[in-house]
Image: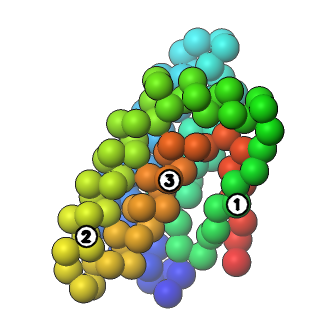
Amino acid sequence: MGCLGNILWFLFGGFISGLSWLVIGILWCITIIGIPIGLQCFKFAGLSFFPFGKEIRYGGGVGSLLLNIIWLVVSGIPLAIESAIIGGVLCLTVIGIPFGLQHFKIAKLALMPFGATIEQH
């Protein structure tokens, strides 16, 4: 379902999700201090555009925790709410359940992006 799922995903919600991550990344990159955070947003924008066949692993240490707290206050909550709402709407139909589950995966990522890595499978 990887290739077909990614194409359908992009058409039915992935474009909006990925675009949101790109906009947030650009806003973070406006400041010099925010460039590392913006680059992380760009990495996750790629995941948001095409999530099927990829898995997220969470880890990290104290630095990741501190960045996640700053991220959550400034940018994480709106991205998580957006993905959760789209995921909930998609789960109302049987056909949309796989896409809704992907949105929930991205909503969790929006809450704790630092220390997370993307793995292909």
Q: Which mark is residue 39?
A: none
Residue at the (27%, 85%) spot, across then down: 95
Q: Comparing marks 3 and 2, which lies closer to the viewer?
A: 3
Colour setup of the view: rainbow
Q: CA distance from mark 1 to mark 3?
A: 11 Å
**Horizontal relation, residue 62 to residue 116: left or right:** right
Can you say whether 35 is above or below 54 in the image?
Answer: above
Q: Amino acid at mark 1?
A: Arg
Residue 13 percent coordinates (x, y): 31, 61
Q: Which mark is residue 108?
A: 3
Q: Which residue is mark 2?
A: 90
Callout 2 crowding tier (Cα within 10 Å): few <14, some 14–19, many ≥20: many
Q: CA distance from mark 2 to mark 1?
A: 24 Å
Residue 42 visible, this orientation = no
Callout 3 crowding tier (Cα within 10 Å): few <14, some 14–19, many ≥20: some
**Horizontal relation, residue 120 to residue 90: left or right:** right
Q: Amino acid at mark 2?
A: Leu
